[in-house]
Image (tube, grey):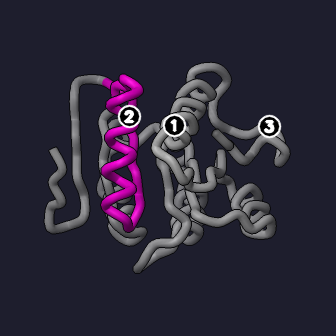
């Protein structure tokens, strides 16, 4: 069941599961992400935004109870980058309860440092295989359930499969 409505938002809203948003301009990445969640048996409410501008519109229009618990945020998106979204999210008290996991195809230490300093909770280099994608998603949920996603130091900020 993949649908891409006109506004670039796709919702899958079961009962009272963990609320997630995946903001990524690649619909294939969304498809893999959704499939990984299903295979892991993770019970979620999943929303999809295909660019940063749409993400910020969705968050701004959301009531507090509708905000995601975890945002998986692609760094390189059209209309508004993940970095710009992160700065806006961390600059708005309404969004302080959202855990932000930044995802990117590259690993540049300077960028990773800036993301850490600007309030991202974790950083993931986009996995090359579906199995590795499942592993990092599993890590995120394991960390969330144990001690929360906020990294204790820069040394454990980057998640790897």
Q: Position of residue 19 (x, y in %)?
A: 37, 36
Compare marks 1 and 3 and give the one earlier in the sequence.
1
Of labels 1 and 3, the one closer to you: 1
- Kind of element beneath mark 2: helix
Q: Which mark is residue 137?
A: 1
Give the residue at mark 2.
Answer: 37
Residues at badges 1 and 3 in contact (C-beta under 8 Å)? no
Q: Residues within 10 Å of mark 2 (few under 14, many from 20)?
A: some
* Mark 2 and mark 1 residues within 8 Å of each other at the beta carbon: yes
| Residue 158 position within the rendered picture, expressed as x and y whole percent measured from the top left | 72, 47
SS of the residue at dot 3?
loop
In terms of depth relative to the viewer, which is nearer, 31 or 23?
Answer: 31
Q: Nearer the viewer, residue 155 or 68?
A: 155
Residue denoted by label 3: 152
Report the residue that reaches farthest toward the bottom: 79
> Over which residues does the magenta segment extend?
17-43
Earlier sequence position, callout 2 versus callout 1: 2
Which-is-in-front pick, marks 2 and 3?
A: 2
Determine the CA span between mark 1 and mark 3: 19 Å
User: Which numbered marker is on residue 21?
Assistant: none
Q: Residue, x 53% and y 66% (percent of image)?
A: 82
- How far is the residue under mark 2 from the one under mark 1? 8 Å
**Residue 142 figure quarter:** top right
Q: Quadrant of residue 92?
A: bottom right
Q: Earlier in the sequence, mark 2 or mark 3?
A: 2
């Amino acid at each position: 069941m993949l649908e891409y409505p006109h506004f670039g938002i796709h919702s899958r809203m079961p009962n009272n599961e963990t609320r997630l948003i995946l903001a990524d301009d690649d619909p294939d990445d969304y498809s893999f992400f959704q499939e990984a969640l299903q295979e892991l048996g993770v019970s979620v409410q999943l929303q999809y935004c295909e660019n940063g501008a749409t993400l910020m519109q969705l968050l701004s229009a959301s009531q507090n109870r509708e905000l995601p618990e975890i945002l998986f945020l692609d760094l390189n998106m059209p209309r508004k980058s993940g970095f710009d979204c992160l700065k806006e999210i961390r600059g708005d008290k309404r969004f302080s309860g959202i855990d932000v996991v930044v995802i990117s195809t590259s690993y540049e230490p300077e960028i990773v440092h800036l993301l850490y300093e600007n309030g991202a909770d974790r950083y993931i280099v986009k996995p090359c295989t579906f199995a590795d994608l499942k592993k990092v998603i599993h890590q995120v949920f394991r960390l969330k359930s144990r001690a929360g996603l906020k990294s204790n130091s820069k040394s454990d900020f980057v998640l790897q499969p």
